[in-house]
Image (cartoon, rainbow, N blue to C red):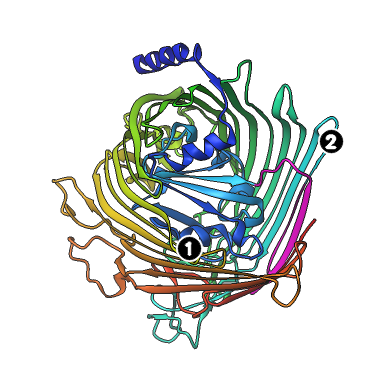
Amino acid sequence: MKYLVFLFFLVMLSFEAFGQADSLENQNKYAKISGFHSDSINVDFYKPFSLRLNTILDRSAGVRVRQQGGVGSNYSYQLDGISGNRITFFVDGIPAEYLGPGYDISNLLSPLVSKIDVYKGVTPVEMGADAIGGAINIITTQSDKNYFNASYSYGSLNTHQAHFQGQWIDPNSRFTVRASSYFTHSDNNYDVWGPGIYYNDPQTSYPQNYTKNNPGKHFNDDISLGHAKIDFGFTKRSYADQLLFSVAFSNLEKGIQTNDYSYPVYGKVRSKQQFMMPSLVYKKENLFTRRLSLDFFSGYSMRENILVDTSRNRYNWKGEVVGKSVTPGEMVGGGTFQTRKENFLVTRFNPVYVINENHKISFNYLRQKGKSEAEELFSSIPYGSKGIRSTKDFFGLSYVSYWFKNHLSTNLFAKYHYLKATMPKAFPWSPRSSGEISYSIGNLGFGLATSFQALNWASVKVSIEKGARMPEAYEAISDGWTVWGNTYLKPEKSININAGVTLNNIKYVGGHGISINVNAFYRNIQDQIHLLPYRNGIGIYDNYGEILGKGIESELQYNLSNVFTLKMNTTYFKTIDNPLPYITYKDHIPNQPYFILNGTLQASFNNVGLKGSKLQTYLLWGYINKFNLYWVSPGRPNGNMIIPAQHMVDYGVAYSFSERVKLAFDVSNVLHQQVFDFYAMQRPGRVLYLKLSYNL
């Protein structure tokens, strides 16, 4: 608490000096010489295509996106070897976890996105997160003009994707209406075979793997998602650059066919999610003074999740019923019809003050306060958790300076995280329990990001942060179902260091240009939070273990005028288990790739066939080295315990008849290879898409 008071005092002092928003020119300058290890990925080139954001990011340096299946499947991001809850996603600076399935990075369509900023390890205070592994911020389409665009895509596995978005601004009053919507459906009914995908031989009862000539199939893995958002208010008025009221809706339904190990197979398990969020956005440069800017957001997130598992049938990978159980439930013993409601108020307050052209102060406050409660409706005696109430507060303060005619930049920052969570003592396994579980904890972190630009095309960046990942509320006080509370749970502590050299856009005669980036990184994470078995099928989260990660990533980019762009990047890291008492000491962390190689080729040609036309094409290639599923030291036999090395190739071509009409063709997994991001979790083979886009 003393750290919170100290940080609050500093903020109050800084408010006497707070001032003007950065102009666009200054913002670009700040981004160019920022000391953070980050990449800004422009999505504009891919908007005519059916390529998904996960695939675009998966070909970026230091990024690995692991997916369990087809469209809408579960996924995990890895940034420089760190993954899981240590990575946080944002949409326009707002935590994506409170924005519903429509803003999930695996669902959002590329035409709705302008760019994606990826921060690795050390994150700026504007992100407002305990993201010790990094943060990904999706920037949606922003424009001060009237526009309208729409698209429809159809592809293999009965995949449909459609979107529209538009904006109208009254030229006199500046009254603004902005709307966007999209729909995605896929049957995801692709073939699977090989180790881990098996059936019991009816004659011998021994397990037999499905083969390429006798494959299994995804038959209960479909997804349907609809999303819509409308904004209305005023833009570019004397009292506000943006004053917009918004309402967002999402509806998601999908099948669940298996668990993380591809066995058993579920044929009737379904999940549903409904979401609504009203919100308010206020942005203003030159607020009260020419030096002060303010970015404010507040929204109320309402989400309902439903899980239905009531069938007695038992299925194989062909979708055939091979037996029936005495009790219902394929995934949950005894069956379930569970509803979980989550209501959260999310508020972000981000003022920025420019002291002069070389110094500025930024403060960011983010609060997430709400309640989550669940109810079981299938049991003869309905029960459920009485509600987890949680409040997460983030205070961030940074001081940015530019020295020696902007050749040197420094960003000194501090972050304070606070979590408070409570829940009544009422559990399914102990209905007579009473009282309340309470948990609260805070953590102060700090860091420095600096860059030195020796020449217009050469710079050095270094960033370091002492940070923490706060426990989730359910990790500390239970989810009321299958997790026992641990009020002694501590945050994960980390030391993150990045150092890199950039040679940017070295130009040669004839429009040739080369850029080179090389970055080294160090990660030391202590007091890892793990789910451990407790008793009677109940788990408990506890702190143990230490991760030590070191690695290097590099990227080479070649440009020829505005025609060709070729990128090659590679990432190698060694993430090891570091605590001395364990048998796995100094072992590679299992079940994660450690060597990645990617290539991207983009080409654009104007006036091909028709005047005003444009031909665009891309080729994406990725290579992942083989890696172990389990720890090596305990002496597990390898054989089936290795995720094999693999090559992934995607290709697309688009033709713009004019600025308004575009037709694109994509091929995912051109080589039609078996692709595994996780053991026995095969992704789709070759998939084709055809997409028509219209811009007004």
Q: Of helix, strand and loop, which one carries label 1?
A: loop
Residue 139 painted magenta? no
Can you give x and y, in whole percent of width and height, for residue 496 in the image? Answer: 30, 40
Q: Say what amino acid the circle numbered 1 marks.
A: Gln
515 over 612 or under it: above or below: above
Can you give x and y, in whole percent of width and height, for residue 572 in the image? Answer: 29, 60
Residue 143 painted magenta? yes
Sequence order check, earlier mark of 2 and 1 = 1
Task: Report the side of 16 relative to 179 (left or right).
Answer: left
| The residue positioned farthest toward the front in the image shown | 509
Task: Report the side of 383 relative to 193 (left or right).
Answer: right
Residue drawn at x 80%, y 56% is: 696
Quadrant location of residue 561?
Answer: bottom right
Q: CA distance from mark 2 to mark 1?
A: 48 Å
Q: Of helix, strand and loop, which one carries label 2?
A: loop
Q: Which residues are magenta?
A: 141-166
Of the pair 463 and 107, the residue shown nearer to us: 463
On the question of residue 187 being in view, the answer is yes
On the question of residue 377 being in view, the answer is no
Residue drawn at x 46%, y 79% is: 673
Which residue corresponds to mark 2?
A: 171
Q: Which numbered dot is residue 68? A: 1
Of the pair 100 and 329, the residue shown nearer to us: 100
Secondary structure predominantly adopted by residues drawn in magenta: strand
Quarter of the picture holding the N terminus: top left
Can you give x and y, in whole percent of width and height, for residue 617 in the image? Answer: 59, 71
Could you classify mark 2 by the number of other residues whose Cα lies within 10 Å: few (under 14), some (14-19), or many (20 or more)? few
